[in-house]
Amino acid sequence: MPTVVKPVQIAYHVRDPEREARRCAAEFGWGPFFLMEHIPLARCLYRGKESHFDHTSAYGQAGEIMVELICQSDDSPSVLRDLFRAEQRGVHHVAHFVADLSAALAEFRARGIAVALEATTTNGVQFAMVDTSATLGHMLESYEPVAALQRFYSHVRRAAAGWDGTNPVRRL
């Protein structure tokens, strides 16, 4: 029996995360959103090869689940370009926590699911995306619930508690 995937985040590919964050706040009450531009990575492997992944994301809360609005700054090969051209929009990935990232990736590989991205943020958070687009229509993002990531999830959730809709986008 495979490990059960329990989604904690849904990510939408958009052209402009800041503009889409304002729209999602106004239309759906999601937010507030925290915008991170040109997110630096200490390490990035795209389909097993060293790569560069220049992306921008806005993170907000939608009830019990985090929402990420993500875009890429160029058209180089990447997990985003695998599914979408720059002007397209749609669900790109669903994220979940795993107890052990290496073990989870080994399990996916053993089941014939390709690891499309392995990366580490500059503050040491490791994450990966596996290509489940043939079965789910989107990728799955996996990461361990390390302290830095837990703090970020808590920060976004706390900001949403009692939020009155003002200041829908906040830069980080």
Image (cartoon, rainbow, N blue to C red):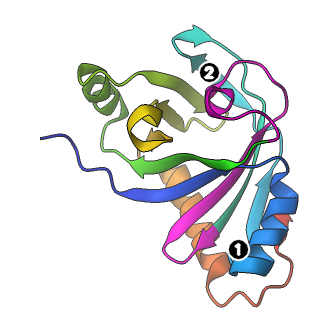
Residue type, mark 1 in image: Gly
Name the secondary structure under disc 2: strand
Q: Say which quadrant the C terminus sits in.
A: bottom right
Quadrant position of residue 86: top right
| Residue range of the region highlighted in magenta in the rendering | 61-87
Q: Position of residue 123 (x, y in %)?
A: 63, 38
Name the secondary structure under disc 1: loop
Q: Is residue 83 magenta?
A: yes
User: Is residue 66 among what the camera can see?
Assistant: yes
Residue 55 lies left or right of residue 171; in this view the side is left
Q: Is residue 25 above or below residue 46?
A: below
In the depicted view, which residue is nearer to us: 116 or 125?
116
Residue that carries the numbered disc 2 in the rendered image? 44
Q: Position of residue 22 (x, y in %)?
A: 84, 70
What is the total number of numbered labels drawn onto the structure image? 2
Q: Is residue 159 above or below residue 44?
A: below
Q: Is residue 14 magenta?
A: no
Residue that carries the numbered disc 1 in the rendered image? 31
Report the Cα–Cα distance between label 2 and label 1: 29 Å
Q: Residues within 10 Å of mark 2 (few under 14, many from 20)?
A: many
Residue under the image location 49 percent in, 33 percent down: 129
Residue under the image location 81 percent in, 23 percent down: 75
Q: Say which quadrant the N terminus sits in.
A: top left
